[in-house]
Amino acid sequence: MTRQEIEREVINVFQREFEIENPGMDDDLRETYEFDSIDAIELLLAIENFLGSEISQEEKKQAINIRTINQICDYIEKIAKKRNLLSPA
């Protein structure tokens, strides 16, 4: 997977699961879209589906301070790199 594929999938998740059309990549999810902890759990499940494997407890802890879609993409990219799932851009 590439960064573009990650971004495309994350935006699709926001449109499909949270009915947020054209979310801003740097918008604060809590302030702009009233994103809450239940939404975060749903997002983590969607990320696990996208990666094709479970996220470890340690990886989940790393997600606590994520506030933007760009940060979500960075987070997925880091996990994908660790699991050798990234393709050259």
Image (cartoon, helix red, strand yellow):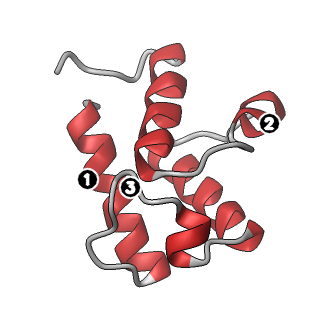
Amino acid at the residue labelled 3? Val
Image position, residue 11 (x, y; %)? 33, 61
Mark 1 Cα-neighbour bin, 10 Å: few <14, some 14–19, many ≥20: few
* Residue at the spot of label 1: 8
Q: Mark 1 touching mark 3, by CB under 8 A?
A: yes
Q: Residue at x 54, y 59 (%)?
A: 46
In this view, which residue lies farthest toward the bottom? 19
Image position, residue 48 (x, y; %)? 58, 48
Image position, residue 12 (x, y; %)? 32, 66
Mark 2 Cα-neighbour bin, 10 Å: few <14, some 14–19, many ≥20: few
* Residue at the spot of label 3: 10
- Of the residues under marks 3 and 2, which one precedes in the sequence? 3
Instruction: Work out whether 79 lies above or below 32.
Output: above
Q: CA distance from mark 2 to mark 1?
A: 24 Å
Q: Residue at x 20, y 16 (%)?
A: 88
Image position, residue 4 (x, y; %)? 21, 39
In the image, 68: left or right of 6? right
Instruction: Work out whether 13 lies above or below 66.
Output: below
